Image (tube, rainbow, N blue to C red):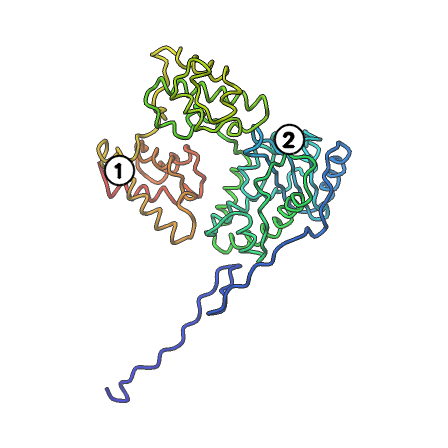
Amino acid sequence: MGPEEQPAPAQPQPEPAPAPHEPAPAPHEPAPAPLLLREPADGIPPVTGTERGLDAAARAVAAGEGPVAIDAERASGYRYGQRAYLVQVRRDGAGTWLIDPMGVPDLGPLGEAIGAAEWILHAATQDLPCLAEVGLRPVQLFDTELAARLLGLGRVGLAAVVEHYLGLSLAKEHSAVDWSTRPLPEPWLRYAALDVEVLGELRNLMGVDLAAQGKDEWARQEFDALTRWAPVERVDPWRRLSGITKLSSRRDLAVARELWYERDAIAQERDISPGRIIPDAFLLEIDKAHPRTPADLPGGNRAVARYARRWLAAVARGNAVPEGELPPRALRTGGPPPVRAWADKDPAAAARLAATRAALQDFSVAHTVPIENICSPDPLRRVVWSPPPVPDVDSFAAALAAEGCRAWQCEIVAPLLVAAFADHPS
């Protein structure tokens, strides 16, 4: 090759722009360690547990500006139910307030002070039920965990999101403590105050990123839906017993059901988490022993002996259930059959579901958003198994909306369904 034929030297390519608020570390240099966030900016506020203190908090919050960061601490695993044992609020101009619902069970005055201001929460569905119990319900909100999912962050816990956006390390060692403890230790109160202190700045930065990625309308619709969200009461909650699928007969299921409800009644009476009364494994041991007298009960747990009469009564109730009223091995959901059976029952539906899932996966990767946030599996299965009479975009969008999908999800998924049905006709 002559000199005139030598290829031009390669031009250096520009580095790709980093994602918003995610600066790339220098080559071959470790990312700097996050700084530990040790103390609230205004110190640890006192705990407010009186009507007078609640009124003061309400006045301060009403005089503040902007959105309200809010959080609640429960005693999951320690107490019966999911009530709030501490509520934290922070607003510009009002500072941080720690409120004890054990002292003031009705926080309605605080809710009135917040009014229509935006709430900022992390993992809203965890806290909304217990906040509603004390009289707090949002008109509008911003969920930093859900925003993290829509933005495609690999880790969406509060500590991880704080580190990602603020370069700070947020200690989480007190997240699972017994918040019904009184008085609350100072380290726990420090942790509680810090949780709401970071939410305002997170919300602002994440709002910028949502807009930059074209996902701000997605987030708006998701957050709006959360203001109307309520937990769905589980059918046959006793079926959550760990290991229940190993029971050999429907009669054993009936006994397990009675044992579960008896344990739940004891837990409610004592205000203790059911698992702390007696673990699931021991309930199933009682079931398998078919006891008729205290001597027949399995040993190894004090609660077995302490509540022997109640366990035996529960076993007797289960054994007395008429044969025709025994619980089925599995609940009928009223929805489509298990997906593993689709290939035999309706091969075209199976192919359509697979094609739609593959298209959703491609969209998920291209837009860095989890596939389950684009469309939950259940509504997708229901619409594919029982499609509208006319398989066009509008009909599929209406069918998805009827299953609870938001408008932005319908806009994405409906065309994918049309394509899947066109490629796999009956």
| Left or right of 27 in this view: 323 | left
Badge 1: few (under 14), some or many (20 or more) residues near its Cα, within 10 Å? many
Name the residue located 41 percent from the left edge and 16 percent from the top edge.
291
Where residue 363 appears, x then y in whole percent?
Answer: 37, 50
| Marks 1 and 2, the one that precedes in the sequence | 2
Quickly name the residue at label 2. 134
| Left or right of 289 in this view: 194 | right
In the depicted structure, whether residue 96 falls above or below residue 330: below
Name the residue located 69 percent from the left edge and 48 percent from the top edge.
92
Where residue 278 appears, x then y in whole percent?
Answer: 50, 27
Quickly name the residue at label 1. 350
Q: Quadrant of the C terminus?
A: top left
In the depicted structure, whether residue 317 falls above or below residue 403: above
In the depicted structure, whether residue 260 falls above or below residue 91: above
Name the residue located 40 percent from the left edge and 39 percent from the top edge.
376
**Looking at the rendering, which quadrant does residue 396 occupy?**
top left
- In front: mark 1 or mark 2? 2
Closer to the camera in the image, 340 or 60: 340
Closer to the camera in the image, 189 or 151: 189
